[in-house]
Image (tube, rainbow, N blue to C red):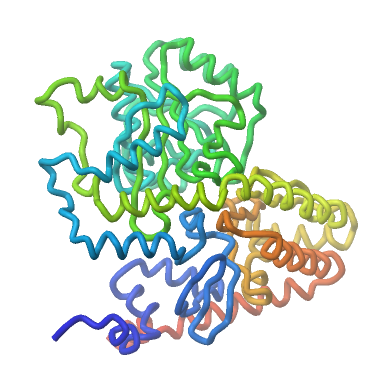
Amino acid sequence: MSFNLAELLELRRHENFQLHERYLNPQLARVVKTLGFDRFYARAEGCYLYDDEGRRYLDMLSGFGVFALGRSHPTIKDALRQAIDADLPNMVQMDCALLPGLLAEQLVKRSPANIERVVFGNSGAEAVEAAIKFARASTRRGRICYFEHAFHGLTTGALALNGSAEFKSGFGPLLPGSTIVPFGDVEALTKELRRGDVAALIVEPIQGKGVYELKREQWRAIEAAVHDAGALLICDEVQTGLGRTGAFYAFEHYGLRPDIITVSKALSGGFVPVGAMLTSDKILRSVYSSMDRAMVHSSTFKGNQLAMVAGLATLSVFDEERIVEHANTMGDVWRQHLEALASRHEFLHEVRGRGQMIGVVFGRPTSAGPRRRWRAIEATRPAMFSQTLVVPLFHKYSILTQVAADNVNVIKLLPPLIAGEGEINLFVDALDELLTDAETSSRWLVDFGLTMAKGAMKRTRSPANSAKATT
């Protein structure tokens, strides 16, 4: 009996949430149901998701930046079919396959002159773990500094460099010597560097959690302080890299010259996970220093032929469709439209970000009525206001978004880099209507409350909960 995917999907359709509640993460299922985001998506294409009833949703998350080229890009699909049909000898391990070399070559060509070598892995977090190891080996120092609000992954080493305490809670002692520094505080950083034991500073050129930015002169001062102290600068471009901000790497906006770069997300094309750490020949050889150390850092799936093909096809599309240039142009369109909204709506305070990585920042209004509603919402939970927009954006306008971080009133937009003015207008028009409602009445807040109440009822009525009640 052969495997039939279409049959399986049809046979088990609509069991998604029961299966997650029983075998995977039940809390995620609870969150999705409470928000009323529990849809049964049937297919995806470009900037849009489609549920089993044929309803279309504008995807402003793109898998947290994975689907830079949109979903189901035909070039990548065709490349993967070619690879499967070629019966490539995959992961021989005691081998030097061609495709990893070709993808490494393409990444190096797009990087600064000091970047000469690539180490592949499976994810952004794994690339960060490699960066930590190589920085410590190269400098023979133990400490890694990182900034407040940082997010570098959730594996143990990367988690140690996470600027949000809620992610670390309950996991015990992490990487020894990891040191947090206020974001952009050159004086505090210099104080740590003077101790002479810092191997590296790891940074996101634009922070994902909150879409926080620094000015060019601040970044240059930070870079100078790091290099003057003999430490390394690691630029975590897992989310900001590969065109997201309107440049191939976000650090290019600030004229930085990192010693180590980490990439992932967009490089996969959305099909096969892949991550990479890029660095200099000198730093790489500090780890791979002799034949007997050829495998001291490795990963079973590091040279997965399908991942390499996905990466090569993705970069090919970047070139052919001028994706980076398009993202840069759309960044100007985003800013123009959203700043126009900010001039009309008291709740909208600021627009952050570059390219197609946008932070829409909300804050307390000045007029009496809106101010009262703001206080009432924020009294229930800090930064609740932005969530009262995320939910109706989905339910009323079929636009999938999410807040940029816990306890910040920021909606972060990470649309596919192929998104154009049509998608921008859909979002801006919807937000305009919502903010108008919020400033003139409490109707939108009542609708939000009803949606959450319905979600809570669905959650308590789930088959998994019913089964527990009978045992």
Residue in the image at 65% along x and 43% along y: 354
Apparent side of residue 218 relative to residue 79 in the rendered image (left or right)? right
Q: Is residue 313 above or below residue 82?
A: above
Q: Position of residue 208 (x, y in %)?
A: 54, 45
- Residue drawn where x is 46% and y is 63% of the image: 73
- Which quarter of the figure is the N terminus placed in? bottom left
Q: Residue at x 34, y 24 (%)?
A: 135
Residue placed at 46% from the left, 55% from the top? Answer: 66
**Up-down: is 6 above or below 310?**
below
Q: Quadrant of the C terminus?
A: bottom left
Q: Going by the image, does 384 lie left or right of 23? A: right
Q: Nearest the camera: 339 or 21?
A: 339
- Residue 293 at x, y percent in the picture: 14, 26
Q: Nearer the viewer, residue 401 or 144?
A: 401
Quadrant of residue 284 within the rendered picture: top left
> Exactly how many numbered labels are in the figure?
0
Taking depth in this image into account, of 85 and 359 the one nearest to the observer is: 85
- Position of residue 37 relative to residue 186, above or below, is below
Q: Position of residue 99 (x, y in %)?
A: 27, 45
Q: Looking at the picture, how far across and down is residue 373, in whole percent?
A: 79, 63
343 vs 12, left or right, is right
